[in-house]
Image (cartoon, rainbow, N blue to C red):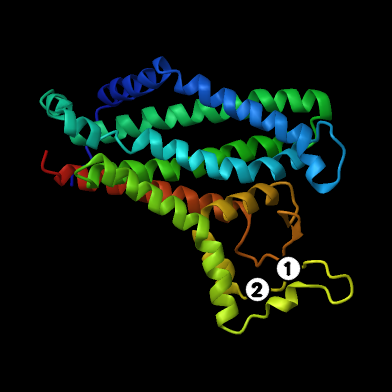
Amino acid sequence: MRLEFSFSKIKAIARKEFMDNLRNRWVLALSAIFLLLTMVMSYFGGAQTGGDVEFHGFEATVSMMSSIAGLLLPIIAIMLGYASVIGERENGSMQVVLGCPVSRNDVILGKFAGLGLVMLVTIFLGFGVSGLIVGALAGFAGALEYILFMVLTFVFSMFFLGFSLLMSTIANKRSTAIAGGLVVFFSGMIAGIVLMGLWVASGGDLMSMVDPNTGAIIMPKFPDWVWAGEYFSFMDIYGMAGMDLFGTNDFMGFEMDYPWFVNAPMIFAWFLFLTTTTFLGSIFIFDRKDI
C-alpha cells in the first residue's frame, strides 16, 4: 500500500463533503441541538440531585451533559459516515470519481477530513456558544477544562466516524454498513454491564455495594481487569475522562476509586489510537476494494 496523497485533491473532496452537509443544514441543526441541550442540562440538571434550578458552572454542566453527548455523538457520527463510500458505490458515482485523476487515498482522507470538519464545527459551535452563555451566567471557573472537554468530545466522536467510514469501505450494502456501526455503538453501551456480570461471576459481591449502616449505594474496589475492560465501554470511559479533567473522581453521582491507568490523558490517547486505527484500516481496505 502506497500512502501517496495530493493535498489539493483532498481539500476539494473535503470541501464537497462539508458543503453538502452545510447545505443540508446538518451542521446548524446539530449545533443548535447541542447548544440547547447544554443550556437545559446546565439549568435544570441540578434538580435531579436535589440541587437548585439555576445555571451551574462548567464542572456540573459537563457532569450532566457527558452522558447525553456520549449517546448522541456516536449516533450522529455513524449516520454521517456509514454511506460515505458504499452510498457512492451503489449509485455509481464512485466509479466516476475514481475515473478522475484522484487516488483512492485522496478519496478516503478527503471524506474523513470533510466529515470530521462537520463534527468539529458542530461540537465547538454548539458547546462553545453554550459555554460562553453558561460562563457569563455562572462564572468562568473551569473554562480551560471545559475547552479540553470539547477537544476530548471531538476525538471521541471521530472514533465512531472512523469506524463508520471503515464499515462503509468493507460493506457491499448500506444496511450492512450501518449495522456494523450500530454493533460497535451498542457493544460500547453494554460493555459495562457485561464487565459487572463477569466481576460477580468471578466472586465479586454485589452486597458490598450497599452500606450496611445507611443503605446507600457505594462503589466497591473493583480489580484492575474490570477497569481495563472499561476502555471498551466507550460511553462510560468518555464520561470518566470528562470528570477527570476537572480533577474529580465523581461519576454518575458515585465516588470512584480509579487505578493509575484510568485518567483523562490515557483515555484521550485511547480514542486517538482507535480513530487512527480505523482510519488507516479504511485506507488499506479501500485501496484493495473491487469497485
Residue 179 placement (x, y as % from top left): 33, 48
**Residue 133 appears left or right of 213:** left
Q: Secondary structure at mark 2?
A: loop
Distance between mark 1 and mark 2 Cα atoms: 8 Å
Q: Please tell me which residue is depicted at 72% across the width and 66% down the height of the picture.
A: 257
Name the residue rendered at 50%, 30% in the picture.
Answer: 120
Q: Secondary structure at mark 1?
A: loop
Residues marked 1 and 2 touching at CB (< 8 Å)? yes
Q: Which residue is mark 1?
A: 219
Mark drawn on residue 32: none
Q: In the image, 136: left or right of 154?
A: right
Q: x, y (%) of residue 274?
A: 42, 51
Q: Is residue 16 left or right of residue 93?
A: right
For label 2, count other residues whose C-alpha is less than 10 Å away and answer few (under 14), some (14-19) or many (20+).
some
Query: Which residue appears at 46% of the width and 53% of the height?
Result: 186
Q: Which residue is mark 2?
A: 222
Point out residue 168 in the picture as x, y percentages from the top left corner: 27, 41
What amino acid is at disc 2?
Phe
Q: How many marks?
A: 2
Quadrant housing residue 109:
top left
Towards the viewer: 161 or 213: 213
Q: Is residue 196 above or below residue 186?
A: below
Q: Of the residues shown, which amino acid type is indicated by label 1? A: Met
Q: Position of residue 134 (x, y in %)?
A: 76, 27
Res 102 visible: no
Quarter of image, res 40? top right
Figure quadrant of the C terminus: top left
> In this image, 205 relative to 229: left or right?
right
The answer to whether residue 227 shows anywhere in this view is: yes
Extreme residue in the top direction: 23
